[in-house]
Image (tube, rainbow, N blue to C red):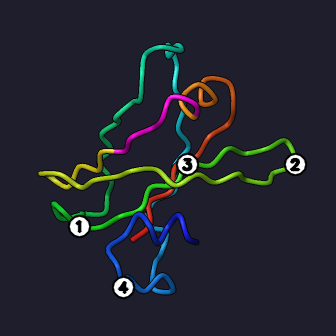
Amino acid sequence: QADIAAALPAGTDLSALAVNELVPVSLSGYAAGMGDVVVPFQFATMYQEGQPVVAMLGFVGADGVVEWHVLQAEVVAGGIVNVTIPVDLALRMTTETTVLAILN
């Protein structure tokens, strides 16, 4: 929860957060040395530019347990959510089952 709180404005009520999006994602053609990946997502939910959101990337284990990571996310014009995926997680996405959740 500390990672989620750090991604939101101070004073945000974490108990009021809800998962608005949960989608499977994958990454192909990525190689070490390519740097962080900024991926624009557009969802059915109409987010407002500048609206605080939290992106979480989950790696689904063989036992069904999900290992979650908080990512940097920013809502820009048109309700697009730009999600930044760091190198280490991008590399894992090329071989592991991955899901993306957006909370707000």
Amino acid found under the numbered disc labelled 2: Asp
Q: Pointer 2: what residue?
A: 63
Of residues 35 and 43, the one nearer the viewer is: 35
Using the image as rendered, state which of residue 88 and residue 21 is in the foreground.
88
| Residue identified by numbered label 1 | 51
The percent coordinates of residue 61 (x first, y second) are: 79, 44
Dot 1: within a 10 Å radius of its alpha carbon, few (fewer than 14), some, or many (20 or more) residues? few
The residue indicated by pointer 4 is 11
Spatial CA distance of label 4 from label 1 is: 15 Å
Q: Say what amino acid the circle numbered 3 marks.
A: Leu
Check residue 1 for magenta coloring.
Answer: no
- State which tag comes first along the sequence, 3 or 4: 4
For marks 2 and 4, give the one nearer the viewer: 4
Q: Which residue is mark 3?
A: 57
Q: Secondary structure at mark 2?
A: loop
Q: Residue at x 51, y 26 (%)?
A: 27
Label 4–label 1 contact, CB within 8 A: no
